[in-house]
Amino acid sequence: MLTIHQKIEEYADYITDKLNRGEIESILTYPPSTKFTERETQALLKLGKDQELKNALRKIFADNSAGVIFALMNYLDGTADPNEKLGEWTEVAFVDKTDDIELPDEMLHDSFYSTYRDWKEIRTD
């Protein structure tokens, strides 16, 4: 859990530092293949070296990340159910890995970005 908190802060710092330096185009990884429009880029460049705005954005980014992780943990704990309209949900369990446990061929992080198009097709705006 402590590593997750560390990563939330590191990612929030990473993004706000890049925004502060004007490195706008290199910060997006989600949704895949997304880019800022020219007007969005110009608006972000206006952020400049505003330390108060950087601090506020960092808090927003960290809070958003923590909210997503908390929701995911609720699904994994079985204290919340994902939207059934998005597909069948099977229970999961975390166990300490030993040499006797064989890992699946496909890891969760491997399919995360590649399933975005599936999500985009079924989401309702």
Image (cartoon, rainbow, N blue to C red):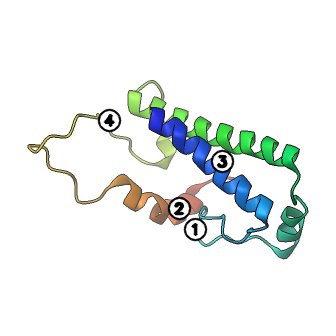
Q: Nearer the viewer, mark 1 or mark 4?
A: 1
- Asked if the residue under mark 4 is in contact with the one under mark 3, i.e. CB atoms within 8 Å, the reply is no
**Residue at left 54%, top 58%?**
119
Mark 2–mark 1 CB contact (< 8 Å): yes
Q: Could you tell me how far apart the alpha carbons at marks 3 and 2 are, in whole angstroms?
A: 22 Å
The quarter of the displayed image where residue 104 is located: bottom left
**Mark 3 sits on what residue?**
12
The N terminus, quarter of image: top left
Q: Which residue is mark 4?
A: 91
Q: Which residue is mark 2?
A: 116
Who's the residue at 20% across and 51% down the image? 103
Foreground mark, 3 or 4, reads 3
Residue that label 1 marks: 32
* Res 81 visible: no
What separation in Å lies between label 3 and label 1 (alpha carbons)?
Answer: 19 Å
Q: Position of residue 31 (x, y in %)?
A: 61, 63
Query: Which kind of residue does numbered mark 1 sit on?
Result: Pro
Q: Amino acid at mark 3?
A: Ala
Distance CA(mark 3)–CA(mark 4): 31 Å
Q: Secondary structure at mark 1?
A: loop
